[in-house]
Image: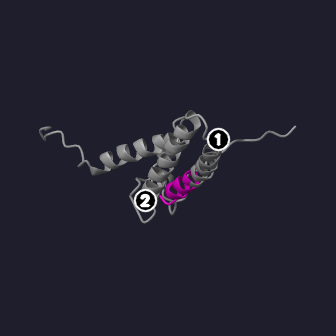
Amino acid sequence: MATATSQRTEPAASEPAGEPLRKTAPGALWPWVKRASWVELAIFAALCFFWLAPGFDHEAMIFGWAHGLGFIALCVLIWVAILRHEAPYTLLAATLTPVGPLGSVIGIGVIERRRGRPAANPGAASP
């Protein structure tokens, strides 16, 4: 009967330990994420309108397809931005909530507000 010993290996000195969790910074893809989020929100709003209004079955189908494809494209775009460290993973989580594109627009607003704040200074007076 062979026994296996578990050994803990430490990361090599050349590998940065916190690389996957480094801070995000807006890059070339960030404006596209913002635009796609707003466009997808407009498509989703139109879909909701045509779905609720009677007699717009064809329009509801068209905007349903547009929302479905656009939402998948938005999620892929956000995922690529996460991999490039241009967006935090919480933006994808906000996008995948039941409110969909509204979650991504709100998430972008929160992220930009946090990025715009100066570093916390305990000695500074708050406005």
Q: Residue at x 18, y 39 (%)?
A: 122
Q: Which residue type carries mark 2?
A: Trp
The answer to whether residue 88 is magenta is: no
Does residue 115 appear in this view?
yes
Residue 27 left/right relative to 89 = left
Quadrant position of the C terminus in the picture: top left
Pointers 2 and 1 in contact (C-beta within 8 Å): no
The residue that label 2 is drawn on is 30
Which residue is the extreme one toward the bottom? Answer: 28
Q: Which stretch is magenta?
A: 74-86
Looking at the rendered image, the quarter that the N terminus falls into is: top right
Q: Which residue is mark 1?
A: 57
Q: Quick check: 126 above or below 108?
A: above
Give the quadrant of residue 27. bottom left
Q: Label 1's element? A: helix
Taking depth in this image into account, of 76 and 58 the one nearest to the observer is 58
Element carrying mark 2 = helix
Q: Position of residue 49 (x, y in %)?
A: 52, 38
Residue at (44%, 57%) from the top-left corner? Answer: 35
State the image coordinates of residue 61 (x, y, percent, origin top left): 65, 45
